[in-house]
Amino acid sequence: MSLNSIGNIDEEERREDVAVAVAAVERQDSREVDEGKGTWKHAAFHVATTIATPAAYAPLPFALASLGWPLGVSSLVGATLATWYSSLLIASLWRWNGKKQITYRHLAESIFGFWGYWSIAFFQQVASLGNNIAIQIAAGSSLKAVYKHYHKDGTLTLQHFILFFGAFELFLSQLPDIHSLRWVNALCTFSTIGFAGTTIGVTLYNGENMDRKSVSYSVQGSSSLKRFKAFNALGAIAFSFGDAMLPEIQNTVKEPAKKNLYKGVSAAYTVIILTYWQLAFCGYWAFGSEVQPYILASLTVPEWTIVMANLFAVIQISGCYQIYCRPTYAYFENNMLRSKTAGYFPLKNCLIRLVCTSIYIVLITLIAAAMPFFGDFVSICGAIGFTPLDFVFPAIAYLKSGRMPKNMELRLSVQLLNLVIATWFLVVAVLGCIGAVRFIVEDIKAYKFFHDL
């Protein structure tokens, strides 16, 4: 045998060894990605953190004030029940065709094909960007309120605190995935309860110490303004139940993932009902039609409790922000970090993640600082982003998947209920978008960019 032949054999053996090693690494990575590790409690923390943010339920008293008691209460209760039901529908579609769908986009693709994937990708990006703009404004407002309590003549503006919060989120963005945020989100869930309890108590205290005869519950403005306020309020209520990440959360949960997510969603909604409804009703009762879009702005005394509520808000928002930016990060990572040599260059991967997350955070921070119109972003994000993802798609996807009850009467009831939910919330999406755009245009006319509100 010639030396060249021996050299060729050695080269082939080395290639085979490298191929085997790479395949082993890929199999290990696949198992780590595919096998969820979280419990139903972790799922509950993630769902509660995603939905029950101060930025989500702090505008609810203002939404009720824009609709009045009868329509406001019925809209809030109806949206709660509808989105709870829709969340259970999404959870039930886990492995609906025998395959694991690890993201909302892949679930849509498995049911509706190419257009399903890209439709959900679009709505998720709208929801992610709109939600994080809105909650970054809310976090900046809360930080500024704490600052002004201790430095009444301080010169720092809202834009400074929006920037500070963005820098902190850039730090958290270096954590690799949603599961790595589980303890952050556990803290955020307790902060949600703390924020709700503190804010409800202070709201009742303020309401009791006001002249109740001066409080009006009539919707203010002309007939045209009342209509746009109502449209805007519907978008805000849709935003308050925004959860565009259920399949991604379900992918972090260990088997039986379907059962664990049922329990996690139900536990999270127990927290949501106890906080949303009480805060919405108490806030509207206390301040009537004069309530502010961000309820903390309506509170005056005692000051130390308002500071505490604002701190709870910032802590909770920090976790929610991370949940919603993860689909965008995942897109970059799937296209830039997933390679056969990924395990050999960890520093390169960290640098790529830092660059990608920095671009995202800078974009969100710039928009939030330039146009700090909290209520308007809440409404347009709810109308365009969350309504399709949380109400319309789950109802239609469940019908399309064919996973219907065998009992004929129950089957017809489910079909009718799903069609009603999908149709009504399509209308809500259109009306909410109209109202939000109208108020954004008005605010841009009234304020300059980077206005310190």
Image (tube, rainbow, N blue to C red):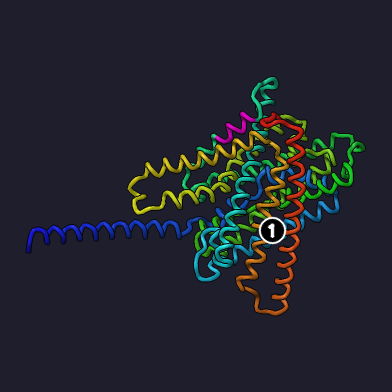
Disc 1 packing (10 Å; few <14; some 14–19; many ≥20): many
Secondary structure beneath dot 1 equals helix
What residue is rendered at 77% in x and 31% in y? Answer: 300
| Residue tagged 1 | 83
Percent x, y of residue 375: 73, 41
**Would residue 279 be seen by someone viewing this image from the given angle?**
no
Residue at screen point 75% across, 66% down: 420
Which quadrant: the N terminus? bottom left
The answer to whether residue 54 is left or right of residue 329 is right
Q: Position of residue 383 (x, y in %)?
A: 71, 52
View extreme (top): residue = 153
Query: Residue at 59% across / 63% down in the picture?
Result: 91
Report the front residue among 47 and 13: 13
Q: Is residue 220 left or right of residue 256?
A: right
Residue that sits furthest to the left in the current view: 1
- Provide the residue span drawn in magenta: 159-166
Residue 189 position (above or below residue 140): below
Any part of residue 53 in sight: yes
Q: Quadrant of residue 28?
A: bottom left
Is residue 174 magenta-colored?
Answer: no
Magenta stretch, overall SS:
helix
The image shows residue 243 at horizontal and vertical percentages of 63, 53
Residue type of the residue flagged with mark 1: Thr
